[in-house]
Structure formats: structure tokens, C-alpha cells
Amino acid sequence: MSRAFPRITEVRLTPILIADPPLLNRSGVHQPYTPRLIVEVETDGGVTGLGETYGDTVYLDRARELSRDLIGRSIGAVNAIASIGRSASTLLDAEPAASGLRGALTTDKVRLSVLSAFEVAVFDALGRHLGVPVHTLLGGKVRDAVDYSGYLFYKWAEHPVAVAEPDDWGPALDPDGVVRQARKFLAHGGFGSLKLKGGVMPPEEEIAAVRALAAEFPGLPLRLDPNGAWSLETSLHVAEQVGGVLEYLEDPTTALDDLAELHRRTGIPLATNMVVTAMDEVRPAFDRDAVQIVLSDHHFWGGLLATRDLAAVCRAYGRSLSMHSNTHLGISLAAMTQVAATVEGLDYACDTHYPWQAEDVLTERLVFRAGAIAVPETPGLGVGLDRDALARLHERWKAMPHYRVRDDVAALRRAGIRSSAR
Ligand code: GKR
Ligand code: MG
């Protein structure tokens, strides 16, 4: 007789606003607050599971709609979640700036990003019910700790609009500032590799920053990610100048044929979270050898099982898998760590924005040691929810309706700054 698992009785969706420093990227600058969505799945077995995803209005609306379909489902039927709300995908916005620089935004990416939080919450509940960590439910861990990369950003000292929580990172607008920030990062978490978000300054300045990092931290693997801001010519030039100290170049440009040519002519490995962001984008990129490392993201790929599927596809093609990140809190980091713990051949440290987030909804903040997060052995995701923190951040969301959508261009627009002048 098959075992009966608890059934879902309630899905609680709590949109929150989290403080974010003025980090610069190709589109502009992070706003003082970023929306996230916290999902709690309650069951009739007494266990509750946690999930986290993007909180912009389009995700929240879809989550409200799709969450109804979870009620009454068994938490033992995780695979079935993937088909909730499935229909033909349509383009919502071709401009990557609108979706946090992770490729075009489609209805299916929104759906998958919502379902990923549901799936993670169901895995968390199932793990708690069975008394095992999520990685056990995914087949078991193949490592005891997951390496993350220190994620450096060009950065203003403060937001152009007053915020309650100024950060203590200081500005980073030239090579010295970037190196100063890197030192802080290494002191914070002892990271074993560093990534610089590029596409902000003229390429020569970003080349100088990478050289400064290489000189300050000899032998430390470095990455540069301009989010597709460059032409093929610029990408070739950057690869020529600093290719020797980069473990990979990330999304230098976006046309597949240009990426293929760049790789063919320079040999530099190319990583992406912009041109391979959904299954139908895999083949064209791999067939051309335009991408060597896919930066998966369990949010927009549809969850932890989907991430493992992607890992298998990459293995079949002889490509590497690592992880992309966007502004997120500890529930997402815990989920990333659980799935990354189970993926063989994770050759590169994963990305995370977590060190940039001073606040969290966890009872205990996750801590980087030697650049890694230890894989927990406690049931589920291994994290607890701080209800007071959740309520506080939800109150902020209610009080600030003008931050309901991530918009990196807003501050520049308000200040009358053209992106080339920043
Ligand atoms: O947070 O500014 C940012 C990043 O640029 C983010 O939007 C990207 O999606 O981190 C991401 C990346 O690796 O491209
Ligand atoms: Mg990237």
C-alpha cells in the first residue's frame, strides 16, 4: 500500500521589500528596496515549508493565481508541480533590463519562477515530514559544502534618495575602490574566487579593475560580467587584455554567433545567465559552441528538479553548470545550496548576492566559511523563519507601493543621469 503524505491546506504568500545597496550594472542602479516573495506551504501533517522568489507584481499576481492549484495536493507528489499553469509561453518584455538582466521575460519564466518557490517549499515540508534534508530527497549530496564566489559591484556610496539603512560598503567607482571592496568581501567570507559586475564603466576601466584585482590577489580566479553590454570587437579586446587572469568571461555580448567566434578565436570559456535561460535556448547555443558554462538559477529554470535536469543536459553536451544569482535572501541561498550539493561536476563556485543583503527573514543568517556554505544535515532546507522580520519587511512593502517592481533605470531617470554618464 502506498504511503499517504500530508496534503497542502494553505499557501501563504508574503510580499516583502528588502534593502539593497546602490549597486551599478549595465542598466543602471539597484533601487533602495527590492521586492521578494516569501512562500509558506502549510500541510495537514503539521509541517510547513518555505520558498522564496522574485516579488515584482507580475510574479506576485501569478503566484496568487497558481497557489490555488496547490491546495489539496500531496507533498509527496513534487514532480506534478511543474505542470501547474502550463500553457504556451508569450514574450512579456524583450528588454533584459526589465527582468534583472537575465534574458527576455516570458510568461513561462514568470510561471517557472513562481513554481520554483512552491517546489522548494514542498521539498522543505517533505524533508521536515520525513526528517531528512532536501538534498537527500534529490538523491543525496556529493559534497559537504558549496563554494560561492565573492560578487563585486561598482557602487555608489549611497542611494540618490534618502533611505533608512545606509550601507557600510562605501563607494567603488575605480580600480582602487573595487580592490577595497574585494578585501572586505574576502574578510567577510573568505571567497575563493571573485566576480566583477561589468558593463558599467568604459571597457578600459574595467580591464584596469580586473588587472588591479589580479595584482592584489595573485592566482585567485576572477570573472567579469558586463551583461551583454559589449560588441564582439570589444569582447575580443577584453579577452586579449585580461583573458589570462579570468576563469571565464560572462555574457560579454549576446549574439550566439559572436560568442562562438569569441570562444573560437580566444579559447576563453564563456558563461551565461542571459542567452541560455530556458530549455529551448540550450541547443542553439551548445550546437554553435557559444556557451561553455550555464549559470543555472533554480528560480527561473523552475526549481530544484529542473536544475538537476539542466545539469544532466550540460553533462551530456560536455558543458559545465554553475549558478546565477539575483538579489535574494537566505531561503533562496539555502535552496541553491541544497541542489548544488547534489550536482556532480560543479566546476565553478556559484554566484550569490547574499553578502549584499543586510537583512533576512531567517532566524539565523547563513554564514560563508572559506567562501562556502556548509550543506546542512537538518530536515528540509535547514532554515527557520523569523516571523517578526517577515512582518516588518511586509509592512515596508505595504508602505512603499512605488517599489513593487525592480527598476534599475529609475534612479538614473529621476536624477536626470544618462547611463553613459554614471
Ligand atoms: O543584480 O545588478 C544585478 C545583476 O546584474 C543581476 O541583475 C544579474 O542578473 O547577477 C546577475 C548576472 O549575473 O547577470
Ligand atoms: Mg551574469
Image: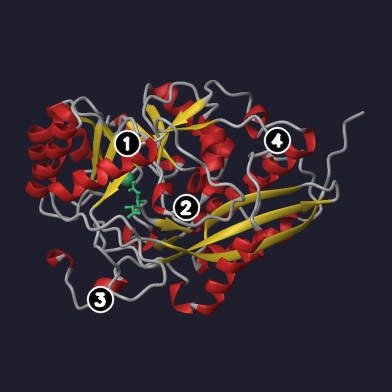
Identify whether 321 is placed above or below 46: above
Residue visible at 20% across and 52% down? 199
Marks 3 and 1, Cα distance to the nearest angstrom? 35 Å
Q: Disc 3 designates what residue?
A: 413
Q: Disc 2 designates what residue?
A: 328
Q: Nearer the viewer, mark 4 or mark 1?
A: 4
Amino acid type, mark 1: Ala
Callout 3 touching callout 1 (CB < 8 Å): no
Provide the secondary structure element on which disc 1 rests: helix
Measured from the top left, where is residue 309 in percent x and y? 53, 32
Provide the secondary structure element on which disc 4 rests: loop
Measured from the top left, where is residue 265 in percent x and y? 12, 28
Q: Nearer the viewer, mark 1 or mark 2?
A: 2
Provide the secondary structure element on which disc 3 rests: helix
Q: Disc 1 designates what residue?
A: 285
Q: Is residue 32 left or right of residue 376?
A: left
| Residue at the extreme right of the image, as rendered | 1
Residue visible at 44% across and 73% down? 403
Callout 4 touching callout 3 (CB < 8 Å): no
The answer to which image quadrant residue 392 occupies is bottom right
Identify whether 335 is placed above or below 247: below
Marks 2 and 3, Cα distance to the nearest angstrom? 25 Å
Q: Earlier in the sequence, mark 3 or mark 1?
A: 1
